[in-house]
Each structure stands twice: as structure tokens, then as C-alpha cells.
Image (cartoon, rainbow, N blue to C red):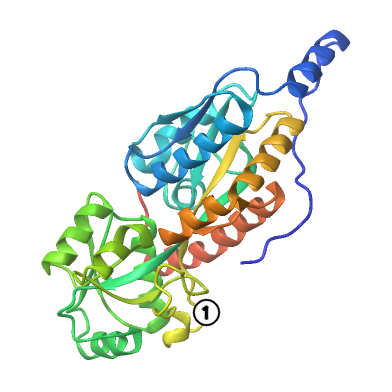
Amino acid sequence: MKFTTALAAILAVAAATPAAGAQSASATASYPTRPIRLVITYPPGGNTDLVGRAVALRLTEAWGQQVVVDNRGGAGGVLGTLIAKQAPADGYTLLLGTSAGMVLNPLLMNKLAYDAFQDFAPVSLVIVNPQVLAAHPALPAGNVREFIALAKAKPGQLNFGSSGVGTPNHLGGEMLKAMAGIDMVHVPYKGGAASIADLIGGQVQLVFSSAPSVVPHVRGGRLKALAVGSAKRTPALPNVPTVAESGVPGYEYTTWYGIFAPVKTPAPIVSRLNGEIVRIIAAPEMLQRFQSQGGDPASSTPAALTAYMREEMARWTRVIKTAGIRIE
């Protein structure tokens, strides 16, 4: 993945009076002076939560100020995102934004009460999660080419599970359908864990899911990995090819997390946050931790994160239009 190196254009807060400006400058220079809240838009225990807590712990250690995780799951990430949007723009409330919350929800939902570009100041990308195309061991296909041939021989007879309509793994399956010219039946579940459980049980034949969720089952022989959706192979499954190199050139499907702040957060605070997060993500222990779980640590400049979001918007707009997906 390529990111731009231009500096972000972050809105500065205009001072009402010279005295207020001096106070604001002083507060910015000494930031942080009290605990920081990191809003995570999913419940505890999932991959999003684990990544957010790892970053929160390292920020706490670096600054000597507690970074408190605030799990606000609900409505596909909308609830937590709105809470972060409405917080004071002072650097003491941050959001662990996700590809679902910052890209897919705006494309799928009518009358969404936030704008990912207008309401938030991007700080840094944190991690890109390769998605694994996992199958039940009994499926008579050992790779993507064989699966596509099987699907073409049995149109509408194979199914794939997802964590719900409009979720990233649903759209990953729709992208594969469109690019490979196959017909599969989508089976939505209330969460990724349920879809994986039914995949293991043989109720569905295929699931796209994040590497941390399926790699243990692949290693244990309960599932088989046909391919990964990222542009390059993942160290967690080094012998598993990408979808693109398996007969579907140009296919790329990943999810990601990034740090955001309310839009009028002072630029110096955004800059300081960015520098610290870039340092944290580059630390050897964090690289090893994320890569062992199948993630790809990937910090960025604020401008690069904005550019990446726009690229993602363009990619998923095409998929959503082709599949005719909409969430009311």
C-alpha cells in the first residue's frame, strides 16, 4: 500500500482574545495533562478492541497519563463514532475509527449523523488487516481457481457467511462474485463469530474474515485457507497465496483501523499524537504482536490516511453499486 507524504491540512482553532490564545497555546504545549479517552466502536474482546487497548497501553506508558478505553459498540460502529464526534476538540477524546465506520457506513446508510471527512481530524493509520478466504475442509476446492470453477459449475448452490449485510466481509464476498463472474448466496449472521462457527460446522462453505479470527482454526485443521485478500501475503499464513495471484488480478480486500480526533482539535496536538503513534507502531514488540495475529502494522501521516480513505471510498462504491446494497 502506498501513502502520500504531504503534511495534513488540519484546522487551527481561532482564539477569541489574545489572552485566550496564550492559554490555548500553553495548554497545547503541555498536552496531555490529564487522562485521555479512546472510544472503540465495538465491544470488548474482539480484534478491534485488542488493537485499541495495545495502542492505549503504549500511549499511557509514553506520556504518564492514563489512556482509558471506552467501548461503545452498537449500530455497526455508529454509536461510538457519534460519541467521539460530539466530544470537545481538545485532544482528550480520540476515536479508533474502522474501515466500516469511516468508509462503509457513509456509503451504505441514509441520513448518517456524521461525516468522516468533515467531522474528524485524521491522526494516523494503525493497522491493516488482511482478510482470509476460509473454507470448510470438506469443500472440494483447495485454492481460489478450483473454487471459482466449482462455483461456475454450481451457480447459486454455494454460500458464504458474513457478520451482517453491508459489513466488510459481506462486501469482500460481493467483490469476489463480481470480479470472478460467479454466483454465490450470501448468508448474513449477527457477528463474525457466529459465521465462523457455522463454517466450522459445515452450514456455510466459505467465509471472508480477519486473519486473527480464522488463523487459529486453520492451524488447528478445522478450516482451510484458500487465499488472503490483501495485495501481499500475510506472515501469519506465508504459504497461502493472495486472491489476486490466484486468478483474480486486481482483487484487494482488507480492513483497517486508524486514530481520529474531533475535527477542530488543535493542529499541534494532532501532530504530537501522530508522532507518538508512528513511534509506537514501529516498535519491534508491536510489529511482532500485530504480525503474529495476521495484521499489517501501518502508521501514516494524517494526509495519507485521508487519501487512503478516499481510495477506499472509490473501491467500495463500485462494489456496493454492483451488488445493489443499501442499509436503511
Say above or below: 193 vs 170: above
Observer-nearest residue: 58 or 45?
58
Determine the image quadrant of residue 172.
bottom left
Where the N terminus falls, by quadrant?
bottom right
Observer-nearest residue: 320 or 258?
258
Observer-nearest residue: 75 or 136?
136
Q: Residue at x 51, y 30 (%)?
A: 84
Say above or below: 185 vs 308: below
- For the question of whether residue 68 can be seen, the reply is yes
Mark 1: which secondary structure?
Answer: loop
Percent position of residue 146, x then y: 29, 89
Percent position of residue 260, x then y: 59, 39
Percent position of residue 258, x then y: 55, 46
Residue furthest to the top:
19
Residue furthest to the front:
285
Percent position of residue 277, x then y: 62, 43
- For the question of whether residue 119 can be seen, the reply is no
Determine the image quadrant of residue 227.
bottom left
The reply, left or right, for residue 180 in relation to residue 281 is left
Residue wearing tag 1: 250
Q: Residue at x 53, y 66 (%)?
A: 315
Determine the image quadrant of residue 196.
bottom left
| Crowding near the residue tagged with mark 1, few <14, some 14–19, many ≥20 C-alpha atoms within 10 Å | few
The reply, left or right, for residue 166 in relation to residue 23 is left
Say above or below: 307 vs 154: above
Amino acid type of the residue tagged 1 in the rendering:
Gly
- Count the numbered circles shown: 1
Q: Residue at x 26, y 50 (%)?
A: 191
